[in-house]
Structure formats: structure tokens, C-alpha cells
Amino acid sequence: MKPVRALAAALAEGTVVLDGGLSNQLTAQGCDLSGELWSARLLAEAPEQIAAAHTAYVRAGAQVLITASYQATYEGFARRGVGRDGAGALLARSVELARAAAGTGPREVWVAASVGPYGAMLADGSEYRGRYGLSVAELERFHRPRIEALAAAGPDVLALETVPDSDEAAALLRAVDGCGVPVWLSYSVAGERTRAGEPLADAFALAAGNASVIAVGVNCCDPGDADRAVEIAAEVTGKPVVVYPNSGEEWDAVARGWRGEPTFDPSRVRSWRAAGARLVGGCCRVGPAEITGLAALVGR
């Protein structure tokens, strides 16, 4: 169902359930995600698979679908021979696919256009380290064209996600200024610090007074690290908190595979909500079954 409320209004009224990891659902559908473009490659080659993955999360109870644009960049598409106009069309398609899937459910479903970090374009795991050696101005110039293309496609919100350090967060917040679409800002963290090692309180403070930011929090992190991060985000910003951690397994960027055992437990949503979380879901390796569990606990 097309939402009749702004997402910010829904967050003011209660908890909203995000989807889970797109790549793991696509893999479960039999898709090959090898290569630098990862799931974004399917925007051109198999858009019906992306639509099916989004629909699986709608059926699981998700109220927000995050688009397949995390690793979709003009630079990345250019390396695959896709020109600028074609890349812009694929970015728009990511929003269109999510919007179509959102319309298949019986409840309001919002579309969040994913804006991944610079390191996602490099496809070398550096989004989990940050500090790329670029200035804030250089990062802003990288992000702005993609943000403009995604905003023009009409999402309900931009998800500035898996941000590893405050320099990139500052660049992203500058790049979205004036785009006309609200945003959420979520860091990837380790303990009580960003992946680059900065205190989370300092990192969250960047968004505290920004009216365009409707939620602040963490994603693509260990579920155990999310607990304290939710508390810090709420304390520092006073904004609704967004939290969608990984399964608890660890990504090996060299081997391009996951190691360890899953520790994601939907029941964590109780403590997250008590601490101020209003957007709750899962990231890598969290699938429709886990989102169904979250939705049941939230009461959706």
C-alpha cells in the first residue's frame, strides 16, 4: 500500500519495521552476486529478482523497503560499460522496483533509497574501515550526483547507511542538503565507536540539529554492539533511532564470505524500543524469517 503518512509521522506514533538483508534474500533465490557491483548488477540483468526479494520482505511484515542501490554508483556502472544516462536510469529503477513491491502489501510500506559509503564503490571492504584519504569536499562531490538521481526517483527517505566515519557522514549530510527528501543516518560500528575508531557520541552529534534527519542509528554491525549504540544515539540527538544489525556472522572481505555463527535475536527489539529505537530491522544475513519475528514482537 502506498503510504499516506510521512515516515517521520509514523515514527512519532510508534515503531516501524524495516526489511532485512537484500543480498542474502537474492542469494536464497539463486542469484549470482559475484563481482564488484554485487546486488546492483541485477538492476540491469534481473530486475524481477530484486522485485521478488522486496516482495518477500513485504510478506514478512516489513514496512520499509531499502532499495538495491547500496553499491550502485556512476563509477561502478562505468567500469561495466554503462554510460551516465544508463546508470541514472538504473538508480531510478531501484526506487521503482521497491515502490512496486511496496504496493503488494495490505499496509503502508515506505521506500528508502540506499546511499552506501564510498568504500562500497571500491568493493574492497574499506567501508568497514573508512578514512579513505579523501577530504569531506571530495566525498561530497562523489555522493551528490547519485543522491540527486535517487531523490528525483521519488523515495520516501534516503538511507545514508553503513557510514564508517564522521567525515563521510558530514559529506553525506552536505550532499543531501536541499534535495527535498528526508534522510536517516546510520553508522557501522564496533563497540561504542565508528568503524574508524571515533566515539559514537561525537559521530551522532553531527545529526543532532539537522532537521532533514528523521532518524539516527546503526546498521551492518554485530547485534551486541547495537544495544549500547541505540542508547547513545537517543541520548545525543533526541531523535528516533534506527537499528538494523547483521546476523552476527563476520564478513571476510578477502575471501568474500561470512564466518562464525548467527546471533541475531528478534527479541532484542524490546530493549531497543525501550532505549528509543523506532526503525528496527536487519542487515546482512537477516532474512524474512527474522523480520517476521520482529514484526510479531512489534505488533504489526
Image (spheres, helix red, strand yellow):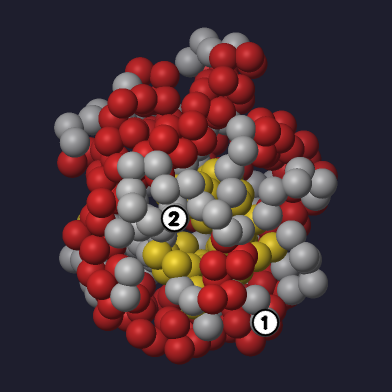
> Which part of the image, by quadrant, shows the C terminus?
bottom left
Please tell me whether mark 2 or mark 1 is closer to you in this view: 2
Give me the residue at 33% from left, 48% from top.
105
The relative height of residue 118 versus residue 298 in the rendered view (above or below) is above
Q: Is residue 52 left or right of residue 18?
A: left
User: Dots 2 and 1: beta carbons under 8 Å?
Assistant: no
Q: How far from the left and from the top, in percent, is residue 24?
A: 26, 46
Q: How many residues crowd around disc 1 within 10 Å: few (fewer than 14), some, or many (20 or more)?
A: some
Q: Which amino acid does label 2 sit on?
A: Glu
Q: Is mark 2 on a helix, strand or loop?
A: loop
* Residue to which mark 2 is pinned: 108
Task: Please state the total of marks drawn on the protein image.
Answer: 2
Which amino acid, by three-letter code, is at mark 1?
Answer: Gly
Rendered image: mark on residue 196? none
Give the image location of residue 283, x and y in percent: 37, 57
Question: In front: 259, or 295?
Answer: 295
Specify whether residue 16 is in view.
yes
Q: Is residue 236 left or right of residue 138?
A: left
Residue ID at (72%, 68%)? 207
Residue 153 figure quarter = top right
Determine whether, in the image, residue 181 is placed left or right of residue 99: right
Mark-to-mark CA distance, 2 and 1: 25 Å
**Which of disc 1 and disc 2 is earlier in sequence?**
2
Q: In the rendered image, which quarter is residue 209 located in?
A: bottom right
Q: What secondary structure is marked by label 1?
A: loop
- Percent across and percent down for residue 109 are 44, 52
Residue 276 drawn above or below residue 94:
below
Q: Residue at x 74, y 74 (%)?
A: 208
Crowding near the residue tagged with mark 2, few <14, some 14–19, many ≥20 C-alpha atoms within 10 Å = some
* Residue at which label 1 appears: 238
Is 279 above or below relative to 121? Answer: below
Q: Position of residue 100 (x, y in %)?
A: 41, 35
